[in-house]
Image: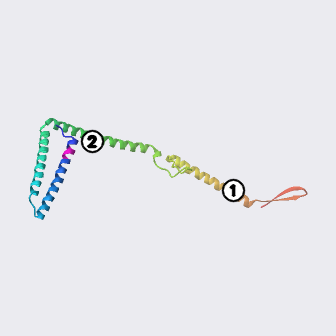
Amino acid sequence: MPWDKHEQDTAVQQSDAFKAEFKERYDAWENAILAGNAGTGQAATEDVLRRWRQHQEILQSKSDMIMSNESVMDNLGQLATQVAEEKSTLAKLQRKATTRADQADSVNPKVRGSPYTNILGLQRTFRDSTRFTILIVSIVFGILALGALSYLVYSLMTQETTTSFVGGARKRRTVL
């Protein structure tokens, strides 16, 4: 006769009921003694204790019967061994999964974040080589922009053009 969850819950509920009944009867007996009427309180408390002990003896006999049945204990031992093997297999698989995830992350350079974002503010991840190329191109464009700006400022500062009309013809003078 195997012991299942339903029997366990029933036994716990019965024990809790005996405990609550004992406390109730004991408190009533104590109050009766304080009031000077100690007649029936002791008998009621002893009756609860007697029934509780009988319940405990029944549980003990069920436990002894289960323990004496070797096939149940063998099955329980086999299940315990199987659980231990499954736990070790699970731990090994979890270690492999962690290692493989780390390996995959180390091979994929797009896993690491990048400070570059697009116009919508969404993060865009780049490889290291792409980031370096963007840096070099931005430096080149910056140098070209500074060069073009300096040439424009120089040409405006050094050349002053005036236009005058001499005899109906347009003459252009450059002053240096």
Tag 1: residue type? Answer: Tyr
Residue 161 horizontal/vertical position (percent): 79, 59
152 to the left or right of 113:
right
Residue 118, given in percent of the width and then of the height, sits at 55, 49
Q: Which residue is mark 2?
A: 87
Determine whether 95 is above or below 20 in the image.
above
- Amino acid type, callout 2: Lys
Q: Nearer the viewer, mark 1 or mark 2?
A: 2
Residue 102 forms part of the magenta stretch: no
Q: Which contiguous range is marked in magenta?
A: 8-12
Q: Is residue 33 left or right of residue 151?
A: left
Q: Is disc 1 surrounded by few (<14), some (14 to 19) or many (20+) residues within 10 Å? A: few
Q: In the image, is 63 to the left or to the right of 136?
A: left
Tell whether position 9 is magenta.
yes
Residue 85 against residue 18 in the figure, above or below: above
- In the rendered structure, which disc, 1 or 2, sits on the residue that comes first in sequence? 2
Q: Nearer the viewer, residue 137 or 66?
A: 66
